Every structure is written in structure tokens, then in C-alpha cells.
Image: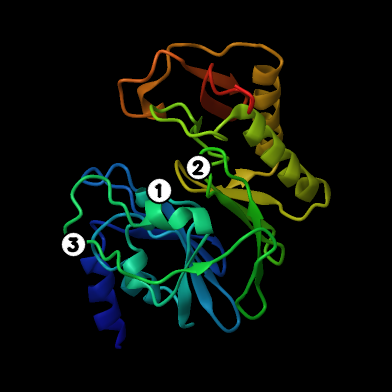
Amino acid sequence: MTVREKTEKLISFEDCYTAHRITPDTWMVKTKTDDMPFSCDCYLLEGSHWALAIDSGMQLPDIAEYMSLLTDKPILGVLNTHSHFDHTGGNGYFDKVFLHPLAEQGAKTPFGNAQGYKTDYEVTPVEEGSLLELGDRTLEIYEIGAHDLSSIAILDRSRGILFTGDEVESGWCNVGSMAGRKPGQTIERHYQNLLKLKKLYDEDAFQMICPAHHGAPLSKESLLDFLKCDELILAGEEGCPNVPKKCAPPPMPPEARVMIYRTAHICYRVDGIRDDG
């Protein structure tokens, strides 16, 4: 493909996708637009042998083709942070889809109109301790389900990046605050998961956090703010009932609250704080 042809291709995707570098071989691909406000921030990681996408958004244009214009490496596939369709809608464009076993049903369930989405793809499961090799980059999988029970964190020690999906957010983190909360979507579970990530923080295994919404990167210290938020809620402090609309589509349930501590915003339910109810 000539330079001009590549430029023309990139321009054809501009209404849906824009990219910028987090590191020299890591791109954040923004997929949220006025026409698709519920999509997410995706990532493209380039190793010495392979490239890999993290999440695929829910825009209809071929995000795999767009990402292939950013790298000279073959794209191994896409790794989903969790099951929600704003992160998985573009999965069908990739040769391989890696996700947690709890994620498959939700990953193939569109929000609203299903027309145009490819959901008949096969999946490769990843769980706690799974490793994905890209050559000189090894990605480690940690289970951190609370916002969604299938959530994983992805640690890239070689570049010092922790990818957290929707479990640690730069705008807000929703822990079971929507109607239809499932068992396990609790602040207690969220807190235990963050303690797991705190061990990686103490090891200095990462220097930045890349969430799936509202921009990246975050400083690693943001993890401590989220821990403090959880600790305040677990200690009996009650957040504000006036939950901002950005936390979830209205109407919010009357049990919903929002707790803010420094850089951390957590939206939760007063009946979803501890696992024992």
C-alpha cells in the first residue's frame, strides 16, 4: 500500500476512530463519538512479533483494518477487558478473540440494534495466570470482576502499563449501581480486587494505568485513591445520592450513591456493599 493509499484509508475511518500514542509502541484508539457515545477507548499493543488489540468498541466500521494501518506487525487478535458490548462489538473483525469464560454470552449480546455486528466468532478463554506473548511483550492476566464479573486486568511489565477496563476509571467506576445487579458486584469484591493490584503497585510492576473510558494514562497513584474510596464505603461512610448523569443512563435506582476521593469516583448501591448483602 502506498503512502497516499494508506492516508486515504485512515481518512475514511476518521469519523469513528482516532489514535494517539501512549508509548512508542502502544496506541490508544478512541471509538466514542457523538453518534456512538457508549463506545470505549481501545488499545493497540505492538510487540516484536505480533500486535494485539485490547477491546474493540462498538462502532460498525472494521476496527481491525483501522488498527492494521497503525502497525507493520500482524495483529494476533483482540483481548477483551470484560463482556460489555461497548468493548466487544468489533470482535468479529479479528482473527482471534481472547476473553474470560464468563464474558462470552455478554460479549455477543448487542446493546439494542444488532444489525451489522458480527457475533458468530469463536473465542479463546483467558483466566487468572494466563499469558499472551507478543515477542518482547508478555501480557499477564488478573481476574478483577466487580463492575462486571468477567473483568480482567492486563499487566504489561515490559512497558510498565496496567490496563484496567472499567474497574479503575479516569471518570468514574460503576460497581453494581445499575438495575439488575448480579451477586458479586459489590464494593467488598472491588476492594479485594484492588488489593490484588496493590501488590503489583508495591512491586513497581507498572508506572501508569490505562482504563477504557475518559482518557489515559492515569498515574499509578490513582489506584490508591480508588482503594481509599472503597475503604470509606466499607467503613460506613455514605456517598452522595445525587449521582451525576455521566455515571449511568438515567433513571438511576434509589439505592445508587457516588463516592469521590481525589481522582477516584465510584458509583455504587447501598444494598451492594458487602458480598453477604
Q: Is residue 208 above or below residue 239?
A: below
Q: Which residue is mark 3?
A: 116
Question: At label 2, which amino acid type do we have?
Answer: Asp
* Residue extending farthest bottom: 1
Question: Taking 7 as reference, is 26 left or right?
Answer: right
Question: Taking 203 as reference, is 194 left or right?
Answer: left
Q: Is residue 249 above or below residue 92?
A: above
Question: Which callout, 3 or 2, points to the residue nearer the camera?
Answer: 2
For marks 1 and 2, the one nearer the N-term is 1
Q: Are marks 1 and 2 in contact (CB under 8 Å)?
A: yes
Q: Could you tell me if residue 275 is visible in this image?
A: yes
Residue 184 coordinates in the image, percent (x, y): 57, 35
Residue 233 coordinates in the image, percent (x, y): 64, 18
Q: Is residue 18 above or below residue 93?
A: above
For marks 1 and 3, the one nearer the N-term is 1
Residue 207 coordinates in the image, percent (x, y): 71, 51
Measure how far apart labels 1 and 2 are at the Cα level.
8 Å
Residue 168 coordinates in the image, percent (x, y): 58, 40
Question: At label 3, which amino acid type do we have?
Answer: Gly
- Mark 1 crowd level (few <14, some 14–19, many ≥20, 10 Å Cα): many
Q: Which residue is mark 2?
A: 148
Q: Is residue 124 above or below residue 59?
A: below
Q: Nearer the viewer, residue 123 or 158?
A: 123
Q: Which mark is residue 221?
A: none
Question: At label 1, which amino acid type do we have?
Answer: His
- Quadrant, the N terminus: bottom left
- Mark 3 crowd level (few <14, some 14–19, many ≥20, 10 Å Cα): few
Measure how far apart labels 3 and 2 are at the Cα level.
25 Å
Q: Which residue is mark 1?
A: 84
Q: Residue at x 25, y 82 (%)?
A: 5
How is this picture coloured? Answer: rainbow
